[in-house]
Amino acid sequence: MTAVLHELSGDGVLLLRINRPEAKNALNQDVRQQLAMHFLDATGNSAVKVIVMTGSQEVFVAGADIKAMAAASPIELLLRQNQTYWDAIAHCPKPVIAAVNGYALGGGCELAMHADIIIAGENATFGQPEVRVGIMPGAGGTQRLARAVGKFKAMLICMTGQTFTGREAAEMGLASKAVPDAEVLETALQTARTIAAMPPIAIRQIKEVMLAGADAPLETALMLERKAFQMLFDSEDQKEGMQAFLEKRKPVYRGV
Ligand code: CAA
């Protein structure tokens, strides 16, 4: 069975659907490799403007595959080089939206946090329960979660393994917004279509500057922003966007 289903719409939205229902979409090497391959392909495919990743109504991803790692040695884990698969997602220059219904646990919560925007079902179940199986988050959970919700909430979540709902995720700043469960995918796709219609170079710069700036001193980050802002004035889409405003018409962006 294909572990990651994919579908590219005419408006530039690539939908990736994790599809391993027998294991609650747990991340084994097959799922990781297929996800990474789709993100690398999308990076080089100009027809893809925005990526939406999702699971099913019942589960986004229930974490790393515990059966596939229970007996692993540290060297086996090292040789799996899983960070290369995560890097393909983290370094994707195009906007990524996670549409989360059901369980987003451990590696599933970490996968969602690789996205730029998270649309969560109100009743989705987020958490970093690794500590309950004797380990700790290993794909960014201690770092991305703390940056998203702050040290004190992140410590509580990682040290107790307690789960929280999509509504709570949105309240604490982990999800961009929570919507009724049945509306998650359509909200994510609608958001993706809105972003896909924006000038692609500006979108790419927003993502690059926001992510790079978050790890830089404020002055450096503001300089990065200024340079990118100035650089956009060399794009045809900047001329088109402002001209269309002045002529009171809808802009037509071409990504140049
Ligand atoms: N790995 C491997 N298999 C998993 C899995 C996982 N993370 N999560 C669920 N499954 C499997 C179950 O073993 C079960 O398989 P069998 O039918 O062969 O027994 C099948 O999926 C159905 O699961 P349940 O019967 O448990 O379904 P449920 O509805 O009763 O519970 C659940 C759902 C709450 C998600 C529960 O399955 C669960 O707690 N899963 C584990 C969650 C977890 O601990 N995730 C963290 C993993 S470690 C990690 O992610 C490390 C990291 O940071 C990268």
Image: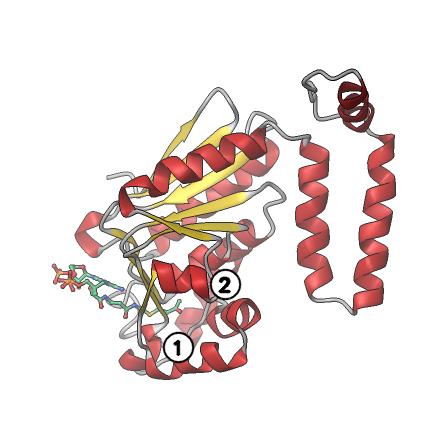
* Amino acid tagged 1: Ile
Q: How is the model colour-coded?
A: secondary structure
Q: Quadrant of ligand 1?
A: bottom left
Q: Mark 1 points at which residue?
A: 157
- The residue shown at (51%, 51%) is 115
Q: Mark 2 points at which residue?
A: 173
Residue 43 at x, y percent in the picture: 59, 38
Near mark 2 (Cα within 10 A), the count class, few <14, some 14-19 or many ≥20, is some
* Amino acid tagged 2: Gly
Mark 2 near ligand 1 (CB under 8 Å)?
no
Asked if one can make out residue 49 in the rendered structure from this viewpoint, the answer is no
Q: Place residue 87 in its image quadrant.
A: bottom right
Quadrant where the N terminus is found in the figure:
top left
Kindly report which numbered mark, 2 or 1, lies closer to the viewer in this rendering: 2
Residue, far left: 22
Q: Place residue 24 in its image quadrant.
A: bottom left
Whole-number angstrom distance, CA of label 2 to CA of label 1: 14 Å
Residue 61 at x, y percent in the picture: 31, 56
Position above or below: 103 against 147: above
Residue 155 at x, y percent in the picture: 45, 82
- The residue shown at (30%, 50%) is 101
The answer to which of marks 2 and 1 sits earlier in the sequence is 1
Asked if one can make out residue 12 in the rendered structure from this viewpoint, the answer is yes
